[in-house]
Structures are given as C-alpha cells and as structure tokens.
Image (cartoon, rainbow, N blue to C red):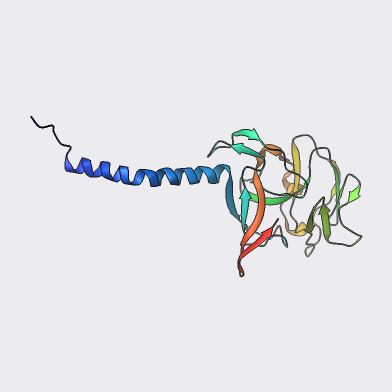
Amino acid sequence: MAATQPAAPLQRIRNIVVEWLPAFALLLLLTAARSSFANHYVVPTGSMEDTLVPGDRVIVDMSAYGLRVPFTDVVVAGRGDPARGEIVVFDSPVDGTRLIKRVAAVAGDRVSLRNGHLVVNGQALADAAGSDIERFGSREALVNLDHGGGPDIDDLVIPRGQVLVLGDHRGNSFDGRMYGLVPVGAFYGKAVAVYWRSGEGPVWKRL
C-alpha cells in the first residue's frame, strides 16, 4: 500500500519555509550584529554643532565599551570605559530619548565650566585664552558659543562609575548640567564617523 502523501497546501508551506529559512536566518544574524557590534544614529538636534549637525548619519561602534547579548543591555565582555573627548550614544536619564554627547570628564576628574570653557584637573582645555578649540588628549572639539556658554559648573569631582557628558554647542545643549552624571554602563556605544550629511550627501568625517 502506497504511503499517504502530504496534502498539497501543506507541501507548499514546507517548500516556502525551506526556501525562505536561509534568508530569515541571515536577517536575524545581521540584526543581532547591529544590536551588538555596529549601528547608525541620526542626529536630531544642534546640541553637538559644529561637530555634528541635525540630519547627520553617524556610524556607532556598539561594542566599544563591551560586548552585549543581542537585543539586551547585558554585557558579557567589557572593553573599557568611555574616555574624555569621545562622542557617546546613550538614553536620556530624563525620558529615555537616545542622545549623543561628548565625554567631558570621567571618574576622579575635577571639573569646572566657565562661560562654556572646560577646566579639567586644573588645566584649561582650550589652546589659549579666548580660543574655541578644546583638546582632549589627541582629540579636539570646536566649541560653539553662539548662544553663550550655558550653565556653569563649579569644581565638580566625578565619582567612580560616573561620566559627565556635554554638548559641543554649549549654550544650546540639554546635557549633564541639567540631568546629572551618567553611569558608565549606560553607554550603548561610541560614535566613529559621520557617513552622510544633509545637503552634502555621502561624506566620511572621523570623530
């Protein structure tokens, strides 16, 4: 007696599953990689001008500060903490909005901010009095003071496990001066480069 053959609709479903399973697996793998290793971010505001402008598309290294389990915030392997001058991506402590700011100071630093200019551990980061270029080791930032310097900071010592973040557009940035310090573990990744600029198209600007 011949074996019973699957009904035609069931066979078609199986064929579709077999055909699309590799594509689905690849999509899942790429999504997991994006969650854990690399992603992109669209800059929504002018708080980081002139370094970043609204509409900029930025490559983000999601593994810069630790490898995470895909689709979670669970870190399985640490890779170091954010360093001064790096541009980082994280969620706002106020409402969870994804933000992008510059690391101004890390644990142990003593920080002051006067008229938009940083002094870290007694050293002014600007090259000279009146200069709008601040140096964070090998990195430099052009500080935008078109709207003034925003709120000052008076001799703040950063405690262990915390980071101070600021916008480069000091008078037009909702940052650590308003919502306080950000825990080290809150950072999703480090901004690496701008790859698309509104009005210009494809670019490659290292950050």
Q: Is residue 19 visible?
A: yes
Identify the residue shown where x is 61% and y is 38%: 67
Give the residue at the far front of this rendering: 1
Q: Which image quadrant: the N terminus?
A: top left
Q: Is residue 91 visible?
A: no
Residue 13: quadrant of the picture:
top left
Identify the residue shown where x is 65% and y is 50%: 99
Give the residue at the far top of this rendering: 1
Residue 79: quadrant of the picture:
top right
Q: Which image quadrant: the C terminus?
A: bottom right
Q: Is residue 103 above or below residue 198?
A: above
Q: Nearer the viewer, residue 182 or 140?
A: 140
Give the residue at the far bottom of this rendering: 199
Q: Nearer the viewer, residue 125 or 15?
A: 15
Identify the residue shown where x is 80% and y is 62%: 145
Residue 132: quadrant of the picture:
bottom right
Q: Position of residue 59 (x, y in %)?
A: 61, 53
Give the residue at the far left of this rendering: 1
Q: Is residue 199 above or below residue 186?
A: below
Q: Position of residue 172 (x, y in %)?
A: 73, 59
Q: Position of residue 66 (x, y in %)?
A: 64, 38
Asked if residue 87 lies left or right of residue 97, the reply is: right
